Image: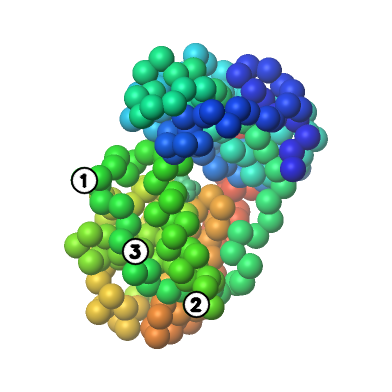
Amino acid sequence: MQKKIWANGEITSFDKISVINHGLHYGTAVFEGIRCYDAQRPAVFRLKDHIDRLFHSAEVMGMQPPFTKEEIVSAVKEVIQENGFRECYVRPIFFYGEKMGLSPIDAPLNCFIIAWPWGKYLKKDAVSVKVSSFLRISDRSAVMTAKVSGYYANSVTASLEALKEGYDEALLLDHEGYIAEGPGENIFFVKGNTLYTPREGAILPGITRESVMQLAKEAGYGVEEKKISLKELSEYDEAFFVGTAVEVNAIANIDDNVFKGEEEVTKDIKNAYYRAVHEREEWIDYV
Ligand SMILES: Cc1ncc(COP(=O)(O)O)c(C=O)c1O
């Protein structure tokens, strides 16, 4: 997949790890998904914010990375450069290594960064979504502001269920029955000139979500974070997913509730996001 990776401080092409691996057995890895765009030169979107979240996730899992944030920021750029990518997806991952038994105390910590070209994540401009029978993990079960690999078992079961039933993507509810998020992305709804999105708590508060809220406000839209129930869905005109991987992707329907797709507000926000990732200097780190 990737030619050159960054492994514990060095650029190498080696990417084999022991199967006796705490991260593999117990999901004790923390990671980020970051996109780099071709803006005349490679432009990494909100790199420092992603690395801040990576270190927050590491802290939640009791990890003490032997690298500073600044070193990881430079290493991300180095991986992009070494591979000669103009546009790519970057995945820094920290995981506990060779130790069995649940406690990770004294387990070695591995720090890797890999990158690969990754085009459109959801394959349709407007996706069909199934409300999952699985609930999103509650903030009483896990620290939802962290991006921990073990949490993704919840996302994977929801995705498999949706795909098996012929949908493109899943939508998970929180433990109170309100809409939380997709398996790997946040969600927005549109009514008139206002955007609505589930409040923080049972969601990963995404960097794209925050960017979109800011861009929408600047474009003159109202933005409201609130509890959103399935019963309300018919009131909304448009719905879209946001996230580093999915970027801004329209939703055609959620179960039987049909939305307008990639039109009007969704299109406007998608364009504003496209411009921001290519041009908005304050959010870009150039390689
Ligand atoms: C569960 C989940 N929610 C939301 C997001 C969106 O987060 P971001 O916009 O920071 O990529 C992601 C992706 O990282 C995710 O995995």
Tag on residue 31? Answer: none
Return the residue at label 2. 165
Image position, residue 237 (x, y; %): 39, 80
Q: Amino acid at mark 1?
A: Arg
Quadrant of the rendered image containing residue 135: bottom left
Q: Is residue 102 above or below residue 144?
A: above
Q: Amino acid at mark 3?
A: Phe
**Which SS class for mark 2?**
loop
Return the residue at label 3. 134
Q: Name the residue at 34% across, 41% down.
A: 145
Q: Is residue 163 left or right of residue 286?
A: left
Q: Name the residue at 74% across, 38% down.
A: 2
Q: Give the CA distance from mark 3 to mark 2.
A: 14 Å
Give the camera-side residue of 88 and 49. Answer: 88
Q: Is mark 2 within 8 Å of ligand 1?
A: no
Image position, residue 140 (x, y; %): 21, 45
Return the residue at label 1. 140
Q: Is residue 201 left or right of residue 101?
A: left
Q: Is residue 6 left or right of residue 142?
A: right
Residue 39 visible (yes or no): no
